[in-house]
Image (cartoon, grey):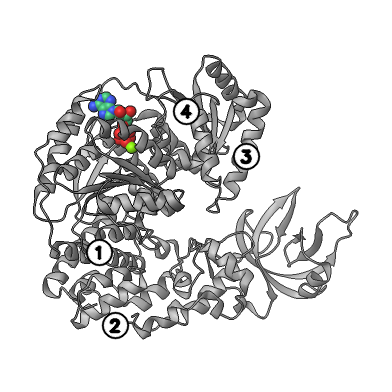
Amino acid sequence: MRPAILNPLFAEATSLSGVGPKVARLLTTALGTSPAPARIVDLICHLPASLVDRTYRPTLRDAQPDRIATVTVHVLEYLPRRISRQPIRVLVADETAAMEVKFFTGREDWIKERMPVKAQLTLSGKIERYQDRLQMIHPDYIVAADDNSNVPEFDVVYRTTEGLPARSLQKLIRRALERLPDLPEWQDSAWRKLNDWTDFKPALLAAHAPRCDDELAPSAPARMRLAFDELLANQLALALFRNRMRAKPGRSLKSGGKLRAKVLASLPFQLTDSQSAAIAEITAAMEENTRMLRLLQGDVGSGKTIVAMAAMLNAVEAGCQAALMAPTEILARQHLASLSPMAEAAGLRIALLTGRERGAARAALLAGLAKGKIDILIGTHAIFSDDVEFRDLGLAVVDEQHRFGVHQRMLLQGKGDAPVDVLVMTATPIPRTLQLTAYGDMMVSRLTGKPAGRKPVATRVISSSRLDEVIDGLRRALAKGRRCFWVCPLVEESGVLDVAAAEERAASLRKIFGAKVGIVHGRMKPGDRDNAMRAFQNGETSLLVATTVIEVGVDIPEAAIMVVEHAERFGLAQLHQLRGRVGRGNAAASCLLVYQEPLGTVARQRLAILRQSDDGFFIAEEDLRLRGAGEVLGTRQSGLPDFHFADLAIHQDLLTAAHDDVRLVLQRDPELKSARGESLRNMLYLFGRDAAIRYLRAG
Ligand code: ADP
Ligand code: MG
């Protein structure tokens, strides 16, 4: 049960006056809580992104153009409009000069009421010079001159969304902050004193009211305190989960390695050294009498699948079943296709379970699973369904887990009381810092390097103004029988617009390449999606327009060219993943990163990194350095924690401190029963990590 003191914070935003259904929807978008409705706590955790300084108060004659200024003027007249589409122009002046105030939208009577002729007004906004005249377009503030108090010295600006003006959002956040109760301190008092930090509430209020850029910076004391709190919640949740798992009995899965040997002998290649090493580590961990929770990390194309297969063979040989879970149906099917021959070589039974297996077929499959007639089950998250019962599941492998959240992973291992070993595979080269936040102290096996014979993918960064050249290149490649991906970006987070963009692109490419063009996206019916993938796989189509559904894992050796549109919108790790989709066969492969101008300096540097390097870890570290953790992996879909306050590129030391603090806390008070423990529970709720409270025996 959530402590009552926190209840006001967990009310929906609609409980604020002025928030009806429409504003609520906009808030959901602006605060990124979708599909959940925005709550008070989401508002108060939305910190200002920038600051507008309105303390510059020049006379009009002295005013520097393009700077935010607050000026006091009187209204002279409304200038005549020759055509009705002309902006409404109001001539104002002080003792030194005149200026035009322009309105491109807005009703004239409304404006005249705010700015009546002869009135003395204080205006605040950007003053510009236009054709030798001063102008101010849509002032941010229009107030009576004797009411200067209505123009704040500093305006905080919040990231918002179209349709929700920053000022409205600001007001709502201010109202939400009024609901913030005083909360008992959860930080260690010596630590807090050492850092000279205030309590949580004053810190949050201060973070919302910066008065200079230093106070807005992530290194400002208020922001540091909040970042630490957030990291502490993250580390505590992971540690509680881990302790719970440790406390449960494990089981030793011993295998002689016969099945493994049989399957490996059937492969047309030799394992790389790091594949062999990883298999040995995992085999040893499975034999141990505890629950395995292990990360298998390896760059795209490093050959993780076979390592996972070896682990599953261990489990089967030890008399259990194994499951492999993929984030998309496409991937699950692909795993089935590539693992079936291996399973056959070992005389094992393998089956597929996705959301699409229904009715009698599904019932038969579930029965087989319960009786132990199926050794290896491949599937999507459909495997989580309550009615899916194994006779004896020994190992669960989660592939490309960055699409799954930490919570789902906890679910998988925490489900029931059966001691299941878990192997999590990730192709996302997660920088070490991020790894700690996503996995805590998880054990890691790492695949370094790639199987021999891989050629680097030639990578070009090219402006969308040169799309013609890209198309010419495609024409030549397609004529040679090559296959190409064309990826359209995620537009916002809706998943609707990106589909529209992809369909539009497919239509325009069809005009050029006709029936060779296929399309696949996340909103297609699964059957259509499979057909589209199959058509591309067997060459019926040779240019596949896709949204990022193809990002992870798809293995089509004939694919030689990867075009990514709006590359500047992707995380580098994502682009690296996409690039990894080509160059798997023998032909020379290339990746064209098409960007939209204008491209900022950081964006340019980022794309240049991809051109320079083919090393996923290097790329991820550089991306972290340039952009900050939240963005590196595209938070929403990354499965990495989505931090409001902490920026791991800056707060790394705080993460380490939080990690150590958690260890001490749990040594002294493993059930969080002390006074501080109670406060820490509040903190877990506040930061949305309360699922971890279930892992307290007494919780
Ligand atoms: P990822 O790590 O991206 O999941 P996969 O497991 O899909 O990579 O492997 C990519 C490709 O490399 C597959 O076609 C696989 O058969 C092949 N492969 C895996 N290991 C080796 C190896 N040791 N030598 C040659 N090819 C390999
Ligand atoms: Mg893979």
Secondary structure, mark 2, is: loop
Q: Give how far across and how far down residue 646 sits, in percent.
A: 35, 60
Q: Residue at x 59, y 69 (%)?
A: 167
Query: Mark 4 near mark 3, Cβ–Cβ under 8 Å?
Result: no
Q: Nearer the viewer, mark 2 or mark 4?
A: 4
Depth check: 225 or 186 in front?
186
Crowding near pointer 4: few (<14 within 10 Å), some, many (20+)?
some
Please indicate whether residue 528 sits to the left or right of residue 259 in the image: right
Q: Give how far across and how far down residue 490 sits, in percent.
A: 53, 46
| Quarter of the N terminus within the rendering | bottom left
Secondary structure, mark 4, is: helix
Which of the two discs, 2 and 4, labels the residue nearer the N terminus?
2
Secondary structure, mark 1, is: loop
Q: Tell me the residue that label 1 is attached to.
A: 416
| Amino acid type at mark 2 | Pro
Q: Is residue 289 above or below residue 243?
A: above
Q: Residue at x 11, y 42 (%)?
A: 255
Query: Mark 1 near mark 4, Cβ–Cβ under 8 Å?
Result: no
Please indicate whether residue 452 sits to the left or right of residue 145 in the image: left
Depth check: 99 or 231 in front?
231
Question: In the drawing, what numbered circle is on residue 184?
Answer: 2
Question: In the drawing, what numbered circle is on residue 537?
Answer: 4
Q: CA distance from mark 1 to mark 4?
A: 39 Å
Q: Tell me the residue that label 3 is attached to.
A: 503
| Amino acid type at mark 3 | Glu
